[in-house]
Image (cartoon, helix red, strand yellow):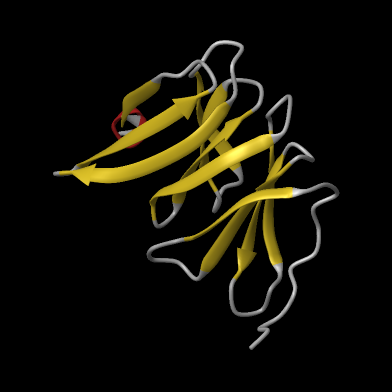
């Protein structure tokens, strides 16, 4: 059963992910943006811009924080509520960030990024600590 359409990206959509706690769906696309949508109303809540090339991967780190990886080799951590980028990492040099995954490690969040360089890098999210 079709539950609706979310239209707004200007080019092809690469990934979609639901927030584990918020009623959000995040999408990333070749138009260099990440969009966060209200899952129920299909309304775009935020358009996150900052990548210099297609955004190829994304994952939620927590309910209200997500990471994106792009063809620019950059990994970004976003706060959809404030529509801000909290952290930018040169994850894989000039190679694309094709895959992202996140998991809790106690009270910390670990992020794995897979790049076109054939390397998987594991990162610890320290943005919450930095904000304290």
- For the point 66% across and 37% down, the residue is 55
Quarter occupied by residue 26: bottom right
Residue farthest toward the right in the current orientation of the protein: 10
Image location of residue 39, percent across then percent down: 58, 73
Quadrant that contains the N terminus = bottom right
Q: Is residue 71 above or below residue 18?
A: above
Look at 40% across and 57% down and name the residue there: 63
Q: Is residue 8 above or below residue 102?
A: below
Horizontally, residue 88 falls left or right of residue 13, namely left
Q: Position of residue 14 (x, y in %)?
A: 66, 47
Q: Nearer the viewer, residue 97 or 117?
A: 117
| Rendered location of residue 41, percent (x, y) | 66, 79
Residue 7's image quarter? bottom right
Q: Is residue 103 left or right of residue 116?
A: left
List the single residue furthest toward the top: 93
Looking at this view, name the residue that lies furthest to the left: 106
For the C terminus, which image quadrant? top left
User: How many numbered dots are placed on residues in this image?
Assistant: 0
Residue at the extreme bottom of the image, as rendered = 1
Q: Is residue 127 above or below residue 45?
A: above
Tell me residue 119's x, y (percent).
41, 19
Q: Residue at x 63, y 53 (%)?
A: 27
- Direction from residue 93 to residue 100 in the image, left or right: left
């Amino acid at each position: 059963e079709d539950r609706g359409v979310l239209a707004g990206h200007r080019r092809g959509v690469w990934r979609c992910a639901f927030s584990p706690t918020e009623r959000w769906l995040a999408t990333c696309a070749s138009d260099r943006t990440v969009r966060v949508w209200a899952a129920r109303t299909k309304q775009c809540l935020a358009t996150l811009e900052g990548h210099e090339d297609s955004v190829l991967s994304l994952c939620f780190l927590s309910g209200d924080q997500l990471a994106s990886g792009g063809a620019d080799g950059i990994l970004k951590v976003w706060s959809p509520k404030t529509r801000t980028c909290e952290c930018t990492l040169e994850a894989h040099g000039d190679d694309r960030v094709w895959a992202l995954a996140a998991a809790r490690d106690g009270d910390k969040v670990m992020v794995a990024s897979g790049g076109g360089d054939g390397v998987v890098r594991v990162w610890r999210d320290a943005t919450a600590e930095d904000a304290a």
